[in-house]
Amino acid sequence: MEDLVIRDADVVDGSGAPSYRADVVVDDGRITAVVKEAAAAGCQRPRAVRELDAEGLVLSPGFIDMHAHSDLALLRDPDHSAKAAQGVTLEVLGQDGLSYAPVDDRTLAEVRRAITGWNGHGDDVDFDWRSVGEYLDRLDRGIAVNAAYLIPQGTVRALAVGWEDRAATPAELERMRRLVAEGMEQGAVGMSSGLTYTPGMYAPDTELAELCRVVASYGGYYCPHHRSYGAGALEAYREMVALTREAGCSLHLAHATMNFGVNRGRAPELLALLDRALADGADITLDTYPYTPGSTTLAAMLPSWANEGGPDAVLERLADDGTAERIRHHLESVGSDGCHGVPIEWDTIEISGVADPALADFVGRTVEESARRRGEPPWATARRLLLADRLATSILQHVGHEENVRAIMRHRVHTGGSDGILQGSKPHPRAYGTFPHYLGHYVRELGVLTLEECVAHLTGRPAARLRLPDRGLVREGHRADLVLFDPATVAAGSTFENPRRLPTGIPYVLIDGRFVMEDGRRTDVLAGRAVRRTP
């Protein structure tokens, strides 16, 4: 007998096609039969060791989080309900150009410090890897959900060049090309960049294009956090389209938003730019989260010249009164490139997490509010936090526009990505709520997308971008990475006030045919593994 039959489910299969009623049979981690209701009439229905009545539930492929920051969370937190409870069965890691492979001892220590605000320092993690392949092997020991990996271009540059703002030598560029090739050979699905983060932002387009050519030769894609999401955002998008077309590389635009006051109502201009490129044969996809605020670290707001040289150099500059005043001028008057070329508005910068518990009183307040309580200018408060927390402070940045969010999520190349930072006592609710928020708020409540469209955006389309031939659809022979949810009640539990509440209406999640969520509760199953690039 088969392992499992899911009876009388409303199947939304991830292709965008209309739903249908069916029994779905699972055996040895794969879907072995999809018996539609009409075909089953008058026939003996499939039997299995276990039968699950799915009356009133939608059965879909597992959701794919195209932009996740769970690089260490998957290792330190076997439960990982933040994603498992949402129905996420695969996360794409290594985002924004900074992660933990490939590294040497020096670079690992530098990267750990640089992105403490994203992932924590990792004192509770045994960093027993250095290469991309070794990191993927570490994931294969058993994790909550599956994970794919992007080679982080900033980490590669830190390893080959350092944290200086200068051009790479020919030998350094060749080493970067070799590191990217090795990472792709070891199973990475592509390469990411963080072009408002050091040291990745110091790479000129010619250098990025050379690395993209390597990625393209292995059938991977380039996923840039490009050079601006504020002033000059459209130019930054246009730059990435031109760069990847010149390099012959597929492009996936990370958290493709149009933020800040200068971009209110301008999403149609971005979509028109993409439509022209798509019509001309470009291979482009994008991801977004269904919220208006962004999330990053407070140190990311600083101008690039202040970040040159790595964390210790940044702290030295902040400690010097004269240099700190230059930083303030760039932030408040000029428009720092770290703040996307827009003068910073301190009332939009909410502190979401700190590494030092002594600073907990700042969490949940904007920098302007804390400054007012202390009777000092906002920059004095921000500077105090950066120094005391040693650059580890994370923030929410309330600068988005709902009309842009809705317009972009409707586009035919759109996919879902949480950009979920799990650090901090008050993280962005997208980390715990992105996928049910799409289904509950934007499908059921607002009708921005149909259910079939939305599921395709979250499953089949990202699987196609990742070139995974046996995931993302409810099909015979595909892996049994599946979600059962109630379309009438599915909703994000997380809010800005209570960001760690789990969603409702998602009782069952399976990975490789094993229940990681059952009756709405997390099981002890660790069915996740590294998902390597398909040759």
Image (cartoon, helix red, strand yellow):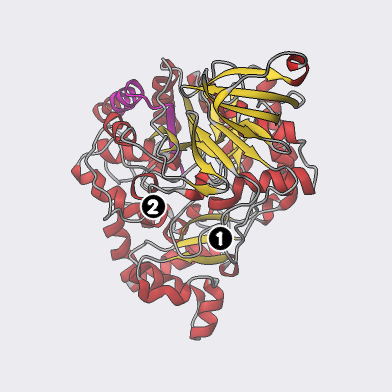
| Count of numbered tags | 2
Q: For numbered disc 2, what is the local secondary structure?
A: helix
The span picked out in magenta is: 176-195
Q: Position of residue 195 (x, y in %)?
A: 46, 42
Q: Position of residue 298 (x, y in %)?
A: 45, 61
Q: For numbered disc 1, what is the local secondary structure?
A: loop
- For label 2, count other residues whose C-alpha is less than 10 Å away and answer few (under 14), some (14-19) or many (20+): many
The residue tagged 1 is 499
Q: Using the rendered image of the protein, determine whether residue 129 is visible from the camera's viewpoint.
A: yes
Foreground pick, 153 / 108: 108
Against 474, residue 75 (above or below) is: below
> Looking at numbered disc 2 in the image, what kind of residue is underneath it?
Asn
Foreground pick, 103 / 338: 103
Q: Position of residue 494 (x, y in %)?
A: 60, 58
Q: Quadrant of the C terminus?
A: top left
* Residue 299, picture quadrant: bottom left
Nearer mark to the viewer, of 2 and 1? 1
CA separation in Å, label 2 and label 1: 17 Å
Q: Earlier in the sequence, mark 2 or mark 1?
A: 2
> Looking at numbered disc 1 in the image, what kind of residue is underneath it?
Pro
In this rendering, position of residue 106 left or right of residue 501: left
Q: Position of residue 18 (x, y in %)?
A: 77, 25
Question: Residue 119 got which mark?
Answer: 2
Say whether residue 80 is magenta.
no
